[in-house]
Image (spheres, helix red, strand yellow):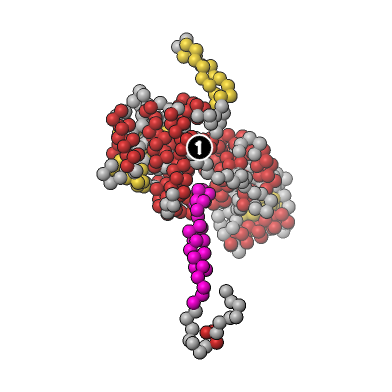
Amino acid sequence: MAGYIEDRWLKKKPNKDTGKRERTALWGKGKRYRVKGIPGVRDRSFDTSEDAKRWLTNAQTDTTRGEFIDPRDGAIPLAQYIEKHWWPSRSDEPSTAASMRSKIWNHILPFLGETALRDIDAAVLRTWTAQLLTRVEASTAQVIWIHLSTILEAAVDDGRLAKNPCKARRTVKAPKPTKTKAKAWPRSTVDAVRAGLQDRYHIAVDLGVGLGLRQGEAFGLGEDDFDFDAGVVHIRRQLRWDSKGRPYFCLPKGGKTREVPLSPNLAKRVQFHLCRFPPVACTLPWRNPEPPTTQLEARQRKPITVLLVLSTAHGNRINPSMWNKQNWRPALAAAGLLKAIGEKVATHGGRVRRYPVYELSRTDMFHVLRHTYASTQLEAGESIVSVSEWLGHASPQTTLKHYAHFMPGAGKRGLAAMDEWFDQDPQPNVPEKSLGSRKAPNGP
């Protein structure tokens, strides 16, 4: 087997005259015994020959199995591994990367960044998780946990860890948010919020409820996406903003385009809106707002022009963060769904302006319109497969997981069919002279 132990303090060959091995220039300096000669394994030194022999045996066995991990590779601090090795190798979409970076840099690096990879064990993770749950909601903590697990799994693949400590499921468990059901608005709430918006933004509510659009999809919708003759809307893109505040177009979530049926009355509202507020031409990069550095990136990020259905009063594309703050939350407050909890004072050009600060409500943001669309379709008895396709979900199972409670009649049709089945007396078809043809005296 490959590998041997070298005594650094004594020469290999004995002196011809004395028959003894002479001391080297390293006598008494550093660790005496060095393990060498294992292919793909760096040399390692030890103070005692017993330690060297034990490590050599284990290293030879693990190398043969293809499982050898040098502990020194795991000595790198987590922050250094992330910043120099893991993060530069990522190729996420800008919006995804911004959210991921924020969570990692705010909730992982400040608390685990100085810890060596090999020292992140079950005890460290339990303490970190407990502290994390005091700062963020369980749903956010779950996402942060997934990011950390992904990082440590990459360290395993890179040969820096033997196993991912996040998968020590006996004592370490990922944060689990409380299961909540998707919330849908009644018609009266939808109308109240719609009335609280500027006229030019009424159509945003209609598109959310009538097509089940995500906010980015609604803000990226173009006039050409409407096929009024066929009665469908093509959902082909969304408008996103990166962490530096730069807008760009990209495919809808999951990279899935889709077609959604357009009701005649919603079509009338869209046409009326387009007459009052003509679409605005907007040219933005595709997929990534960063300047391209190669010809391939130039082709992939080539700007496209869209005649946006929704735009600001100044003729610009909509920044969702500002729109939520200046339009959506005030409309929720006007409808009685939010309360003002304070006031922000800002000075602009010597003029003092006061802005109300509203309480946060994740359940009443634009996405609730998408839930309302799903609720309306499913309560009307529409196929779960069709609704899943119109929503752009990965599978009908995803739709069922989120919206099963919107199907109060589920099972009732089958129950009625079964009840009708047993409403009639059994009529067996058996030979007349067989035992089965005799009637039970008190049968049903």
Instruction: Answer with left or right where residue 82 lies relative to residue 230.
Output: right
Q: Position of residue 208 (x, y in %)?
A: 42, 38
Identify which amino acid the numbered label 1 is placed on: Ser
Residue positioned 35% across, 23% down in the render = 314
Q: Which residues are magenta?
A: 400-427
Q: Please name the residue shown 49% across and 77% down the image.
A: 427
**Image quadrant of residue 344?**
top right
Residue 276 in which image quadrant = top left
Kindly state the secondary structure of the residue where label 1 is placed: helix
Q: Position of residue 13 (x, y in %)?
A: 66, 57
Give the quadrant of the C terminus: bottom right
Please tell me whether the stretch drawn in magenta is mainly helix, strand or loop: helix
Whole-percent x and y of residue 137?
60, 38
Check disc 1 and report the residue beneath it.
99
- Tell me what residue is drawn at x 51 percent, y 57 percent: 412
Seen from the viewer's position, the closer of residues 23 and 241 is 241
Spot the residue most to the bottom: 433
